[in-house]
Image: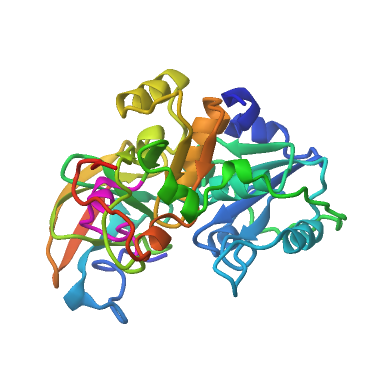
Amino acid sequence: MSRESALVTADWVEEHLNDSSIVLVEVDEDAEAYDKGHIPGAVKLDWKKDLQDGVRHDFVTKEKLEALLSAKGIGNDDTVVFYGGNNNWFAAYAYWYLKYYGHDNLRLLDGGRKKWELDSRELTTEVVERPATTYVAKDADESIRAFRDEVIGAIGTKNFIDVRSPDEYAGRLLAPAHLPQEQAQIGGHIPTAGNVPWSKAANDDGTFRSDEELKALYAEAGLDDAKDTIAYCRIGERSSHTWFVLKEILGHENVKNYDGSWTEYGALRAVPVALGDEPGVA
Amino acid sequence: MCGAIKGGPSLDGVDVANEAVIQGIVTRDGQPVGNAYVRLLDRTGEFTAEVPTSATGQFRFFAGPGEWTLRTLAPKSISVDNAVTAAKGVVAEVAVAV
């Protein structure tokens, strides 16, 4: 994978607005953002209602995904271009999730909704109806998803990247500062994890930094290219952003997103935890 | 839309006593800016959170006690920084002009 195969620019999207084989999909934390105005032709995925199981603490199953994408008019051969708010956190999460179920042609709009808005490009409230499809998902690709047992077993052997803000990493905050403080039982991070906040991979306008800047960023954080890497955050969406950088832009081979992330790890009994600004030891 | 209302969004339902709230309103020439982005930077300048303003130009963060910087981006404007101090049980109101 590379920047060219994983990212598209706002100009590219504007040039392809009338191409029916390209489906724009908006995914936001704020599910109402789409309704207030979206890129012409874009359909909406609700991060919570559409992508979370609702009963089990997990995202929706393969069967539910097939029904969802079929109803949204997304076909197996379509190129899906995700974009959204929060600097594409939830769009990157949806990208990772569709990759997990084997969709071939996926892209992220560089800069997401923010860049589009700051450029004063067109947004519409027009409702989009695409003809239904019969979507068939592939079996889950477990090579890009980490579960808790693998995480605990990998302390001291694999790279861990904690992509939360420094205050969350150190245990001074339990959640991003635009949300009420709640969720995990305790603060801190997985011992040995380096702290590379997702935001260091993005410019102020939400676009990704250059390949050279990104390579330097992770090298400086001590990421060992010879080892497999697990990225995590609080609930797995910001770490999808970093997973996207490492796997899809920089082309690292073995990178997993731990979507259980700190809400799960910080609630586990008897696992090692490090507090403060240093990674800590295995 | 008429002129900007004063201060951040309503605090109804917010547990103010246990939160260090930073909130306010973004205006341009006295009018609220509903399509701005406000980001919260920590004492080292690192990104902590970001929110889009509401239709009435308002924003809110639940921060921790300490020194913070708000960086506001709006269409057709250069970014604007505002320093703010947060404390638990206190609502820090910031008026941002772009």
Examine the residues drawn in magenta and state their main secondary structure: loop
Residue at point 64% right, 53% down?
A124
Which x, y percent locates residue A197?
A: 34, 41
Which x, y percent locates residue A107?
A: 64, 37
Does residue A117 appear in the picture of this structure?
Answer: no
Q: Which picture quadrant has residue B63?
A: bottom left
State the extent of the magenta-drawn residues as a range: A164-179
Residue at point 66% right, 63% down?
A60
Of residue A72 and residue B56, the one placed in the foreground of this image is A72
**Vertically, is B63 above or below A198?**
below
**Vertically, is A242 above or below A236?**
above
Of residue B82 and residue A206, the one placed in the foreground of this image is A206
Q: Which picture quadrant has residue A32?
A: bottom right
Q: How many marks?
A: 0
Location of the C terminus of chain B (image quadrant): top left
Which x, y percent locates residue A186?
A: 28, 64
Residue at point 60% right, 62% down?
A35
Residue at point 60% right, 38% down?
A108
Of residue A25 and residue A279, the one placed in the foreground of this image is A279
Which x, y percent locates residue A72?
A: 77, 58
Is A33 a magenta residue?
Answer: no
Relative horizontal placement of residue A156, taking residue A10 as reference (left or right): left
Q: Which picture quadrant has residue B19?
A: bottom left
The way the protein has been coloured in the rendering is rainbow
Is A170 a magenta residue?
Answer: yes
Relative horizontal placement of residue B90, taking residue A226 as reference (left or right): left
Does residue A153 appear in the picture of this structure?
Answer: yes
The residue at the far top in this view is A212
Of residue A152 and residue A25, the one placed in the foreground of this image is A152
Location of the N terminus of chain B (image quadrant): bottom left
